[in-house]
Amino acid sequence: MTAAVLPRALPTGRILVAAILGLVAAFALLGPVLVPGDPFAQSLMKSLAGPEPAAPFGYDHLGRSLWHRLVHALRLSPLIALAAVATAAAAGLVLGVVAALRGGWVERLLVILADALLALPGLLMVLIVLAIMPGTATGFWAGLSLVLWVEFFRLTRATARATLASPAVQAARLLGFGWPYVLRTHLWPEIAPLMLTAAAFGTATAIMGIAALGFVSVGMRAPTPELGLMMVELLPYWREAPMALLTPVLATFALLLGLTLLAGGHRT
Amino acid sequence: MTILVSRLVQAVVVALLVGAATFAMMRSLPGDAAWRIAAGRYGYDNVNVAAAEAVRAELGLDGPWLGAFLQWMGDLFRLDFGVSLVSGQPVIAEIGHQLGASLWLALAAVGLSLVIGPPLGILAGLRPGSLFDRVLLVVSTALKAVPQFLMALILILVLSVQLGWLPAAGYGQPRHFILPAFALALGLAAVNARIARDAMASVGAMPFYAFAQWKGLSRAQVLWRHGLRNVSVPLLTYLGLQFVLLVEGVVVIESIVGWPGIGHALVHAVFARDVPMVQGTALMLGLGFVLVNALIDLLAARIDPRGAR
Amino acid sequence: MQNPFRSLLAGLVALGLALPGHAGTTLDVAAPFEIQSPEPSTTGHIFTRMGIAETLVDADPQGRLLPGLATGWSVSEDGLTWRFTLRENVLFHDGTPMTPATVAGALEIARGKPGPLASLPIAALTPEPGALVIALGEPVAALPAFLAEARAQILAPSAYGPDGQAVAVIGTGPYRVTSLTPPLSLRATAFPEYWGAQPNVPAVTYTAVGRAETRALMAESGDADFVFTLDPATVTRLSRSDAVEILSVAIPRSLLLKVNAAHPFLNSPEARRALSLAIDRAGLAQAVLRYPQGADQLFPPAMGDWHNPALDPLAHDPDAARALLAGLGWVPGPDGILSRDGQRLALTLTTYPDRPELPLVAAVLEQQFRAIGVELTINSTNSSEIPAGHQAGTLELGLLARNFALIPDPIGTILSDYAPGGDWGAMGWQNAEIAALAQALARGEGGDAERARIAAILQEQLPVIPIAWYQQTLAVRTGIEGAVIDPWERSFGLPGLRFAE
Amino acid sequence: MTLLSATDITVLDGAVRLVAPVSLTLNPGEPLVILGETGSGKSLLAQAIMGTLPASLRATGVVCIGGRSLPAGDRAAFRGLWGRQIAVLPQEPWLSLDPLMRAAPQVAEAHRLVRGLPGGAARDRAARDLQALGLGAASALYPHQLSGGMAQRVAIAAARAGGAPIVIADEPTKGLDAARRDDVAELLLGALARGGGLLVITHDLALARRIGGRLMVLRDGAVLETGATSAVLSAPQAAYTRELIAADPESWSRRVAPSEAGQTVLEARDLTLSRGGQRLVDGLTLELRAGRILGITGPSGCGKSSLGDALLGMLTPERGQITRARGLAPTAFQKLWQDPVAAFPRTRPLGQTLRDVARLHAAPPDRIGGLLDRLRLAPGLLARRPGSVSGGELQRLALLRAMLAKPRFIFADEPTSRLDPITQRDIIGLLADLARSDGLAIALVSHDPVLIERVADVTTCLPMQEGRKSARDAAIRRKDRGMERPAILR
């Protein structure tokens, strides 16, 4: 079963990924440099007004610049998502390796825990954690980390088990190499590409989750600019200002498309 | 047999996790739980000290930590989910109402996704690398990048608001199913199609697939007799995992279109801090996953006799 | 891949369109309130609105009390004994007759639960032949108005479980419940043995739709015939549509800023007035609420004689606001935020998203207060945080929508909110004069002069800062006649509706 | 009359010619054997004749079958011949049966759908076919419940059910034990009895000898020589053919052991091993001495690899004792694997891996270079990754890596079973040299008793333990199948 039979991504995928994610990142980072402004500043007279130099994407229903709100939103969700993914990846990696190395009841316990978490819808866990944690952003971070580590754990453990039982690792052990060497030269090169895929996928999942909960009004709170929240706020004005609603919709789609492509186009 | 035992263990741990999480939720409600519950019960116009005190007296919200936890888990394992803090109805009864609505929606969505996804995926998998395969890859990738709530939003804008073809919300008639079911199904179908495509491509590259043709069977006969059955196993297994995705979608979509299902109830319960309802619904969803996957395990074992490994 | 997909889609859509609706015989109502249970103390307002349950006393759109299940009432000289003559030949939906004893029993249960009745000094409820006698510990002039409130609805004895919780809705109204599926829907059909005129529409449904956008879409797509409460943007949009008719009426509900007057930053009337001057009510009303005007005093004109047209209207004048704050010793800091004795003028505003306009208004206020150097942190949370914060003394500012017509006589709300203060009213503020005036009014003493004085004191002291007066909006499908909005939010007026031929 | 004739068949990968113009004919009753090593183009030639080439390759030439002339490039035209004119036997019978279908229906479906028998008659025919092959009891089993030989016979029955007169078998003995080889040859020859044609593609001299008929030796896509099989094998004309024949263990001369045995390196007493609850080795005693080669042989799944793990300290014996000679470093015990690619970190350049080992064992800087020379390896290989080096070279690099650790004992677990005969002889020769010159104790595992007999000083034959059949099959399956299910599930 080689790459020829299962194309992992679009042939032009890499360029597309770089272009889309680069564009979104550039916008999020450089947006306010190009056009300085405040995502919270209102000018009610400009409610739903069209684009102008100070607000290239026009204004929302409260006369806040969509350009700047979008910049803020495109920093917020990815930041929370990346923080959660980093935490989850670190936890999953460590626990996965520990489980594969130690085996026995440590492994069994971790696997049972991971399996049980797998049975619970991620958004549900995030909702419960949000209800427990004081801050919304920290709540999202904690909740998403709790949900996402399972995937990293499972990947790491499966790969580590296979790799650690492989002749290559047996050979290294027979030759007298210690575990640190084995982990570095045998395990990490096998896990790293999987981690990238899982991280891209996890980031997309996290961003979707934040937006979805924002959209049903149980996520980030107004007036924080957040993608889902922006959409639900602008939905009533669809007829008056369709572009105002489409702006966050398209931005979300671009961001998620880039991440999905980065994750490899297909994944179970 | 071992499959079922491990699923049973999974179910028990799911229950433990849900119980612990909801207990923590109960104990750590920001602000006073009695106030929250009173607000959920009596509405913002009428929540006041008197209402909050009435709730506090009724629920006995104060008490020592450990005893309360043991009591909580004990109730859980006796399948006593208690009474909704908001409505005062037994949680079981409320969920009983809502489960049906969600189940129908989920079934409609899964059915629709199976009608759309796997046939296209198998068609693409029969000719890996063909134009059709590449187009399907692009379409399914794009669809996968659209979160379900966004899909619902787009469908509502296009089908309901602009074209006026379908009701944007509501429940009770068959036409109400179409929009939410599609919103859920398109995302599922995008992934289904990929799974089916990869499975088909991989089955198609297997020696037995070529050998069946060498025996003299026609392409269609080989696909029908040897292709579909082998593709169905990974597809089925994946469907089980997809259940979580489906449930998440149901939670979000139900809230958007006002579907009186378990997902809607869950979001509401979280918002109103109706912890027994959160516990009941979460447990139902988690155990639903375990049950569905146990059934799929059994079915897969029937189709694929090679055993679980 | 396009073709099979598209034809499938088209097929399903066609299927959806081909299925028979039930238009013509059934009227579908969509409103934001969820049905929690058959319990009147939580869900009663839906049952009275839908014409399923009734109260002893009724009210017209002007707030005048009318006979309901009681045909008339009288009070003794000392104001302590009320006698309500009960309507005869009234049947509950289970076929049992309404008797003085069942009425007394229903009210007895109602006053044991949280609600306006619980606060009344009722000494005894005594059934007498053809009448109910209520003995009070002290005079309550507005007692009939209290009995017009939804939670005082009269249900049959069989509606209650042994613990007094309602287990079924068995009322006396023109509609009888055929199915009740909390939290979202309810169906009812006309009750043939109703004591009054039969409704024109034989069947009604109620659907709880929490999201304003969704309600708007349902109104637009014709999926609901009668949509209660629309968000501002929808009103603008739907008013251009031929498919629906928009009704709008001023109601006795105000959007106001609850101020912790005990807070060191806010304990002088000047400080509160400064905040008030910072608010651009007209701009806010037009841009956010899409109302023609903002509130220039607490009581809206819809409250009739409580509205005092003679008051100096509240104005928008940021310069005056800054001057007032400067007079209190506040000095602008480098970032424009005022400070005094090393303390920044930073406040937390608590509000709740149940009413979608509140977070929006909060966001606007944040900017408008910043313009006079006041920093606002918005905490949009559960609605109970406001009364809870009031009780704990931790609330600083609360943005809320206050209904002055929980009962059709605002005196009930005034008493609980401002004499001296209450969960949804004044906080850390006491005014003996208001308390005395309000209590007198409650006993049935005094009239317009007392009401005007109360309004004037509130305008001067600003324990709460009025921002806007609410309009209730309603979308009715074109072709449905007879729709009126009840400003007291007691009824949808379903029996008066008819489908045009 | 000719059953099949192929004229000027070439196979091209783009502009690269993989098979030079080759012509052949197949006559009734006279088998044709195409002999060649991996990469000789023998399989491509067969595929071109059958019309089963992968889509990325192009074929030219003409194939005449049953009176019809088909251009070799027209793949679709061959489709109608499969099962009806040509019965194609697959390389790996296990992978060629639908894993989700019982054995009998896989035969019956060809009777029904190809030959056109009604359902009941097809089932009866299939049952009789299987009965005739001694598989009566196996007809209700799934492929994973069959042994390799049984699967091979089911596949033959299924391939022939369509009634095709010509049988083409591509490496029919791949993955089978030596003992099964003769059974397969017997079956294939059975097809000839009824006037059919037989084309066998193999690298296996023994099989070629058993089949007889005519032989065609292929190398680099070109025919080196043809002739009667017995004639070619007894008096090869081409140098390459001679080399090929010489590389067959049958032709090796017996190794002469050093007269004096060295000291004992490792000793196992009353060793009993179990794995996964299965008893593998029971009460085995053996001794390994410096300079000596211990041959270990036995059927697949008898516990050869587990014995190695135990000797190397990677598996704790259930009973018995393993004693290592005093004063030896733990790293003096090394191993060679059957699949050398799996024995190296996949993504690391080989040179880097070797330098890591050299550094760990404080080997002098020129040690790697010296060993490269000694093992006849080009230094350029060091820049490559394991996947892009040939199996023979990689196995020698694995040996080099083991040598860096200054071993006293090497457990060589089927080190040549995946290699071509000539390379096999090379590697085994190197091992024998090292045993002599460096005084290494070597345990050599092979399923080929002839090879062991020629090389080993002492031989241990591990018997199959009772009740181990199913576990053995599982073990074989794990080794044989790179892939059991779609990758998604793994």
Image: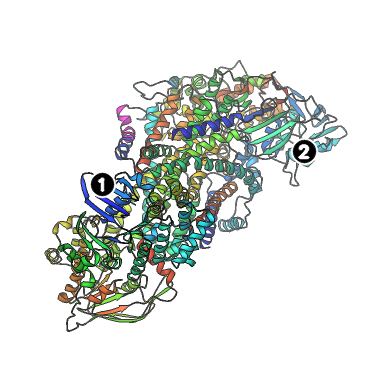
Q: Which chain is disc 2 placed on? A: C
Q: Quadrant of the C terminus of chain B?
A: bottom left
| Label at residue D61 | 1
Q: Which chain is disc 1 placed on? A: D
Q: Which residue is at the far right?
A: C129
Helix, strand or loop for the magenta stretch, by majority = helix
Horizontal and vertical percent position of residue D224:
18, 58
Label 2: state its secondary structure: helix
The reply to the same-chain question for discs 1 and 2 is no
Mark 1 or 2, closer to the camera: 1
Colour scheme of this structure image?
rainbow
Q: Which residue is at the far top?
A: C310
Horizontal and vertical percent position of residue B41:
63, 40
Horizontal and vertical percent position of residue B86:
63, 42
Horizontal and vertical percent position of residue C491:
69, 27
User: Is there a contact, CB below 8 Å, between mark 1 and mark 2?
Assistant: no
Q: Which residues are magenta?
A: A22-39
Question: For the residue marked with disc 1, what is the amino acid?
Answer: Gly
Q: Which residue is at the far front?
A: D1
Tell me, yes or no, if residue D244 can be seen here.
yes
| Label at residue C106 | 2
Q: Going by the image, does D358 lie left or right of C237?
A: left
Alpha carbons under labels 1 and 2: distance apart: 100 Å
Crowd around label 1: few <14 · some 14–19 · many ≥20 (10 Å): some
Splitting the image into 4 quarters, where does residue D30 fall?
A: bottom left
Residue at 74% of width from left, 44% of height from top? C164
Crowd around label 2: few <14 · some 14–19 · many ≥20 (10 Å): many
Splitting the image into 4 quarters, where does residue C107 fall?
A: top right
